[in-house]
Image (cartoon, rainbow, N blue to C red):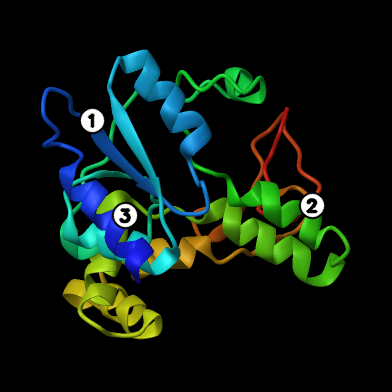
């Protein structure tokens, strides 16, 4: 569209205006603008904000070298090997006051799963226990994203990762699967073991012995 071409023209010229320049920051639906623009101000970086429709946003991220708001893991821009901006650790207290001097940190999926599963006593416990046990490193996730970027389905990418070098990841995956321990036991790896003297547990999924 003409509007889209105008936006791209402005994006292409952003670093080449006579006597002045700015760093393009590309987003869609305003995602990330409120905190990223604050950080650019703190860093004293001149930036041009481009809030594009989804299709133009994805195209711009693949075509130009820009600052762009995105979330990881997701395969959309994986083939471009984007480099993350590394800042100070997130200060959640400041973020609650809408002061974004620090970057946005990772989101704990348990914060969303707990209220959703609160009314599911049968399924809620095992699912929350598995989410609590679930640990996937950056290298693991990049390997999965490589699979998605090659055009395979999520299921096939996960199967490839699981079968890597003779199922080397299988023992770790089995530790994610929750076991229901009896009272007086706790989870250790993928098995229930008795509590040490002076500690106790009430049993259940992801049971832990406490003093």
Q: Earlier in the sequence, mark 3 or mark 1?
A: 3
The crowd level at tag 2 (other Cα within 10 Å; few <14, some 14-19, many 20+) is some
Circle 3 SS class:
helix
Answer with left or right where residue 107 lies relative to residue 46. right
Q: Earlier in the sequence, mark 3 or mark 2?
A: 3
The residue drawn where x is 43% and y is 31% is 36
Nearer the observer, disc 2 or disc 1?
1
Answer with left or right where residue 19 lies relative to residue 27. left
* Residue 132 place in picture, x, y as percent: 59, 51
Residue highlighted by disc 1? 22
Relative to the observer, which residue lies in front, 161 or 145?
145
- Which label is found at residue 7? 3
Relative to the observer, which residue lies in front, 111 or 36?
36
Nearer the observer, disc 3 or disc 2?
3
Residue 118 position (above or below residue 148): above
- Which label is found at residue 181? none
Circles 3 and 2: CB atoms closer than 8 Å: no
| Residue 142 appears in the picture as rendered | no
* Residue 20 place in picture, x, y as percent: 17, 24
The crowd level at tag 3 (other Cα within 10 Å; few <14, some 14-19, many 20+) is some
The residue drawn where x is 88% and y is 63% is 119
Q: State the CA–CA distance, disc 2 to disc 1.
A: 62 Å
Q: Earlier in the sequence, mark 2 or mark 1?
A: 1
- Which label is found at residue 183? 2
The quadrant in which residue 16 appears is top left
* Residue 184 place in picture, x, y as percent: 75, 47
Q: State the CA–CA distance, disc 3 to disc 1.
A: 15 Å
Q: State the CA–CA distance, disc 3 to disc 2.
A: 63 Å
Relative to the observer, which residue lies in front, 90 or 182?
90
């Amino acid at each position: 569209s003409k509007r889209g071409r105008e936006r791209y023209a402005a994006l292409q010229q952003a670093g080449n205006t006579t006597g002045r320049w700015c760093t393009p920051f590309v987003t869609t639906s305003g995602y990330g603008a409120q905190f990223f623009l604050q950080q650019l101000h703190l860093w004293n970086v001149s930036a041009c904000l481009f809030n594009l429709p989804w299709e133009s946003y994805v195209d711009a991220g693949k075509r130009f070298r820009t600052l762009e708001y995105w979330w990881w893991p997701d395969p959309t821009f994986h083939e471009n090997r984007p480099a993350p901006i590394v800042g100070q650790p997130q200060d959640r207290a400041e973020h609650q006051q809408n002061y974004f001097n620090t970057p946005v940190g990772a989101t704990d999926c348990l914060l969303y799963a707990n209220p959703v599963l609160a009314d599911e006593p049968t399924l809620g416990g095992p699912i929350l226990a598995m989410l609590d046990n679930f640990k996937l490193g950056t290298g693991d996730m990049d390997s999965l994203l490589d699979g998605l970027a090659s055009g395979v389905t999520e299921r096939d990418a996960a199967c490839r990762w699981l079968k890597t070098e003779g199922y080397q990841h299988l023992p770790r995956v089995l530790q994610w699967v929750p076991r229901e321990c009896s009272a007086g036991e706790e989870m250790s790896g993928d098995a229930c073991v008795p509590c040490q003297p002076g500690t106790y547990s009430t049993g259940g999924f992801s049971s832990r012995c406490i003093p």
